[in-house]
Structures are given as C-alpha cells and as structure tokens.
Image: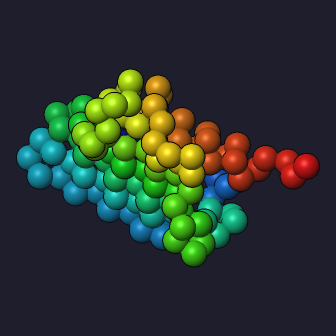
C-alpha cells in the first residue's frame, strides 16, 4: 500500500505543493489510509481509504478550494441508490453523477487535468 501511494504521489508531483498529513493505521485485517494534500493552486485534497484483507471496501476522495468550498468528491457511501453505478458516485457542482472508474489514480488524473488545463 505504501509503495502504491509513493508511486501515485511521485506521478502527480507537478500538481502537489505539500503533503500536509499522512496516516496509515492497521487493526487486524483492516487498514485505514488518511491523506491531506495541498495542491499548487492552494486547493486541498482529502483522501480516506479503508482496506480489509487486501481489498478496498470504503473510500472518500474530496477536492476543496482554498476557502473550503467543495469542488468535487468521489465516494462509495450507500446514499444514492438512484445512480446507475451505485454505490460509486461523484459529487460535482452540477449534482451527484455516476462514477465508472472509482480509483485514486483516476481521481488524481482528474485533478491534474483540471489544474493544468490551459486558460482560454
């Protein structure tokens, strides 16, 4: 898990200003990852993953602006059964939408694309 995280952060270092906090807690077969990252535009990312027996069972990836306004969040909380990809969904400014590829790597790709997008 640590190597996966190390690779991810290295692959996206061009958008990362600082890793503010990192916590990895293991209790029996359950491992909880918590990560707070400051991005180059001063927005923040909050990551929480819960792994059990080597499988990801719960996740929450949130991107907020420097003033704490939500930009986008991905999670698998079971509170939107109307979404075709239930329980996987994303919270956007346009509302709750389906989430087809709920992986942390995909979340960071979205961040990079959004932050480094050319201004027109």
Quarter holding residue 4? top left
Where 40 falls versus 77 (above or below)? below
Q: Describe the colour scheme in one phrase.
A: rainbow
Where 82 falls versus 41 (above or below)? above
Where 4 falls versus 37 (above or below)? above
Residue 18 left/right relative to 91: right
Visible residue check, residue 6: no
Residue displayed at 56% across by 56% down: 71
Visible residue check, residue 46: yes
* Residue 49 coordinates in the image, percent (x, y): 31, 47
* Residue 35 coordinates in the image, percent (x, y): 41, 59
* Residue 101 coordinates in the image, percent (x, y): 47, 28
In this view, the residue in front, 42 or 84, is 84
Residue 51 left/right relative to 27: right
In this view, the residue in front, 25 or 77, is 77
Residue displayed at 36% across by 49% down: 60
In this view, the residue in front, 68 or 4, is 68
Quadrant location of the N terminus? top left
Residue 114 left/right relative to 22: right
The residue sitting at the bottom extreme is 67
* Residue 52 coordinates in the image, percent (x, y): 18, 38
Residue displayed at 87% across by 52% down: 119
Where 13 falls versus 77 (above or below)? below
């Amino acid at each position: 898990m640590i190597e996966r995280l190390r690779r991810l952060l290295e692959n996206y270092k061009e958008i990362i200003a600082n890793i503010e906090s990192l916590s990895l807690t293991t209790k029996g077969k359950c491992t909880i990852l918590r990560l707070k990252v400051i991005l180059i535009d001063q927005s923040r990312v909050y990551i929480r993953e819960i792994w059990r027996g080597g499988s990801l069972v719960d996740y929450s990836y949130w991107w907020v602006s420097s003033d704490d306004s939500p930009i986008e969040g991905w999670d698998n909380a079971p509170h939107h059964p109307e979404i075709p990809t239930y329980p996987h969904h994303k919270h956007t400014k346009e509302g709750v939408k389906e989430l087809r590829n709920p992986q942390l790597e995909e979340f960071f790709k979205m961040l990079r694309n959004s932050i480094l997008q050319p201004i027109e």
